[in-house]
Each structure stands twice: as structure tokens, then as C-alpha cells.
Image (tube, helix red, strand yellow):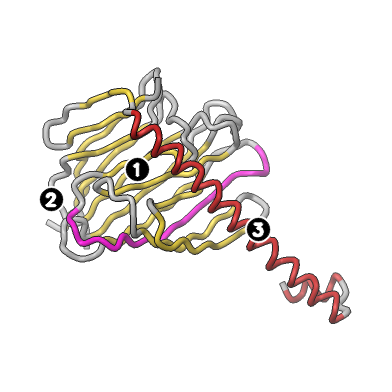
Amino acid sequence: MANTYTLIASNTVGLLGSATITFSSIPSTYTDLLIKSSARTDRVNTVDYYKLKFNGTATSYSERSLNGNGSAAASENNNSTSYGFNYAIDAATATTSTFSNAEFYIPNYAGSNNKSYSTDAVTENNAATAYAAFTAGLLSNTTAITSITLESANAANFVQYSTFYLYGIKNS
Amino acid sequence: MTNAIEINCATGEVIERPLTAAELTQREADAKAALDAKAADEKAAADKEAKRQAVYAKLGLTADEIAALA
């Protein structure tokens, strides 16, 4: 069982915002990776969606997701998509200065099997409508993961003070 | 200007640069695909619910009975 969390790298988005956040040259010395983020985008909506890519790969992602919006729940299947999804980032019309929380977990990222991952995110909004999303995903690609990119699936930008932390996990 | 941030985990270097033209084009295509996929999912869910309601109507169930089945 994993019992160590080592901070590999982190970033806080500056005044100009950013369309993408990429962790590159990730060392292969851990068993699992975990990204924790606190993020908000400038999409003109209450919610935005995370887009997740490993090694810049733009094919062969499959997912099952559970989503809630404060009044209804839904499940979705996405097969053979060009990136991973999570449906819960605070966006421009959510309560001012609130940020969503998210975790992205990638076990056995440096191995030679296809890559599984899970995501877990919630938005914060002082209203009945707020979003929660959970995803179980698979990238059908055996290449070891050395880079991870997060961005808005709606071509928006992460705003200032969004933060991203990449941890390496191993059992020794 | 739309920026990209890259954090090199080996060196700790953080590079902030404008997106390239190709990246901007891909980003727009991805955004359209995301909206299309979400709309298709929502339509499928709405169609399924409409069919469910049609079955309830055909069975002549009351609102309380429908709620009990949910």
C-alpha cells in the first residue's frame, strides 16, 4: 500500500492565466502519480470540464463517469475519445473567487501495460447548482507516462491563483 | 494572448509561452468535439426519460406510483 507522498512539482497560475498546464519529464521512480488541483476557468458558464492528456496522446481514451449537478445525477460512457474528461471545474459565473477541487490518480504510470486513471472533482458555488464528477478511465497505450497535460475542454483558460500539485507515491 | 505553462519535473524549470497556431487550432477542434459529445449525451438522456414517461403513461400509473418506482 502506498505510504509516501512526495511533491514532484507544483504551479500557481499567474496574472495572465493559462490555457494548459503540463507536467513534463516526470521521473519514473514512483509507483503512482497524484495531481491535486484547485482551479477555475474563464469560460462564461458556471461549470467547465477538465481535459486530460498523457504524453500528448490524442486517441484511445475510454471512460465511465458519474456526475451530479445539485438536482440530478447522470452516468456516461465515453469510448475511443481523444482525451480524458472530468465535468467539474468552477467557471466564470460561479460564485466569485471560488475554486473547484480535483484529484487525478494514475497508478502504475511507468509500467508497460495500458494506463488506468481515476478523477474526482467538485465545484464550489453558492447556489443550488454545483457539480461533482467521478471518472474511471483507461488509456489503451502501453507507453510509460512522462508528461500530463490539463486544460479546459471548452477552450477556456485557467485563471490566476489556480494551483496544481503533482505528487509521486510509492510504498517505500 | 493564450498561454501554456510547462513545468519540467526533472529541472524544476517553468516555461510560460504563447500557444502555437497548431495548438490553437487543435484546442478549438477539441472544444467543438466536447460540446458535441456533451450535447449528444444530454439528448440521449432526455430521449430515455421521455420513453420512460411514455411507458408510465401507457401503464396509467399515478404520480405517487411513479415516484415509488424511482
* Horizontal side of residue A12 vs A135, given as left or right: left
Q: Nearer the viewer, residue A162 or A48?
A: A48
- Amino acid type, residue under disc 1 in the picture: Lys
Range of the magenta residues? Answer: A127-144
| Residue under numbered circle 1 | A36
User: In the picture, residue A148 is in which quadrant?
Assistant: top left
In three-dimensional space, the C-alpha distance between marks 1 and 3, rounded to whole angstroms, equals 32 Å
Secondary structure of the residue carrying numbered label 3? helix
Q: Nearer the viewer, mark 2 or mark 1?
A: 2
User: In the picture, residue A14 is in which quadrant?
Assistant: top left
Residue projecting furthest to the bottom: B59
Picture coordinates of residue A123 (x, y %)? Answer: 53, 42
Picture coordinates of residue A107 (x, y %)? Answer: 25, 59
Closer to the N terminus: mark 2 or mark 1?
2
Q: Nearer the viewer, mark 1 or mark 3?
A: 3
Picture coordinates of residue A15 (x, y %)? Answer: 39, 18
| Residue under numbered circle 3 | B43
User: Are the residues under badges 1 and 3 in a single subunit?
Assistant: no
* Horizontal side of residue A11 vs A66, given as left or right: left
Chain of the residue displaying label 2: A
Decide whether residue A131 is among the magenta residues: yes
- Amino acid type, residue under disc 2 in the picture: Ser
Q: Are marks 1 and 3 in contact (CB under 8 Å)?
A: no
For residue B9, the mark is none
| Residue under numbered circle 2 | A28
Q: Is residue A158 above or below residue A35?
A: above
Residue visible at 48% across and 39% down in the picture: A100
Can you say which quadrant of the picture contains the C terminus of chain A? bottom left
